[in-house]
Amino acid sequence: MHLFKAKATLSDYLDLNRRYIRTTDVILFEDGIVKADIIPKQFFNSMIDELYSHAFTSCDKLFEDCELKEIADCLVIDEKVIVDGINRELGISITNMSEAYTVLEENRYRRLQHLIDSKFTDSKLLTLFDLFETRSDKEINEMVTDNADIPTIFEYVLGILWYKASERQGKILDYMKLSLDADLLPKTHAAGGEADIVYEYAETEHYPEHTLLLEATLAEGTNQRRMEMEPVSRHLGQHLIKTGNMNSYCVFATNYLNINVIADFRGRKNMPYYDPNDYEKFVDGMKIIPLQTSELKKIVSKRTMYKDLYTIFDAAYKSELKPHEWYEATIKI
């Protein structure tokens, strides 16, 4: 009976327990299996027998800020032990922790590909954008994670979409200015002072070397105009002044576009932006492309690649149409 009660309690508190465990950033929940990430796994494997011997002993260090070795000698691990453990598990021959972190990065991207193929298929992305439009927050949390707010999840899903449109090229985990948990799902949104996603593109036959700043918001109406116009243009202006690469530009994504936001961003084409600390540094204009989720869904459903989007956006930027005509005529894919 005690066993059944314990199992029932674990089942009742499954979501809460999982959230607590995920805060460690060392435990993975993958395909219904709970396991330690590569480096934490080797760390604990090397001392687990001795660590168990301390499991039911009292410790007066519990509420003190102290070194690991003061708690238990076994917690101080030689890096070589971890490196050797990784070599045994993966059948490789790395020699130091720097190489170990490279392996860990490769493993993260392998897990990302699996996550996209299972959790963020095209059909699921389309469903998610429908839910963002209707602000069905509960359903969004159920599909992605309940460990992040809805605007943060919107940024994350936009990053996944762009990664797929970019043919899965580039270090999207670095480009997304989000804190991710060990399962590569979002926790917190981008810090103030920079774009939500900063995607770097090398030169190809389709476009020059440039950086794309992706800004995402679910604010609507006058709130969108008040909250987003200044930060978006400031982020891009500062980036252009800092890098000097005038090929870089910004895409502003939202579930509903306010006409005055479109007008403001179109006006930035001919409006200078100055460094407030040095008036000698400025740019003559900025390229900002606003997109609604209706167009994001078309990118997914038509499987439009970024090389084609760049051409569409460039032609739209050069258009001289008035803002109320511009979006319909140049952006709708």
Image (cartoon, grey):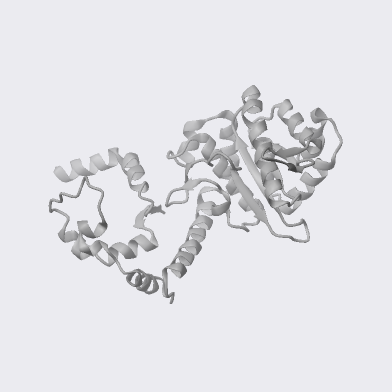
Q: Nearer the viewer, residue 48 or 249?
A: 249
Picture coordinates of residue 152, whole percent (x, y): 52, 39
Q: Relative to residue 51, is residue 299 depicted above or below?
A: above
Residue at figure coordinates x 24%, y 39% from the top left = 9
Q: Quadrant of the C terminus?
A: top right
Picture coordinates of residue 102, whole percent (x, y): 49, 66
Which corner quadrant of the image does residue 321 belong to?
Answer: top right
Q: Is residue 155 visible?
A: yes
Residue at figure coordinates x 47%, y 67% from the top left = 103
Q: Relative to residue 204, is residue 151 depicted above or below?
A: above
Residue at figure coordinates x 82%, y 44% from the top left = 315
Total tally of numbered discs in the picture: 0
Residue at the farthest right position: 320
Picture coordinates of residue 310, whole percent (x, y): 75, 49
Q: Is residue 125 left or right of residue 56?
A: right
Q: Nearer the viewer, residue 22 or 126?
A: 22
Residue at the farthest top position: 222
Q: Quadrant of the N terminus?
A: top left
Q: Nearer the viewer, residue 320 or 77?
A: 77
Q: Is residue 292 visible?
A: no
Q: Relative to residue 264, is residue 207 depicted above or below?
A: below
Picture coordinates of residue 125, whole percent (x, y): 58, 43
Q: Is residue 155 left or right of residue 273?
A: left
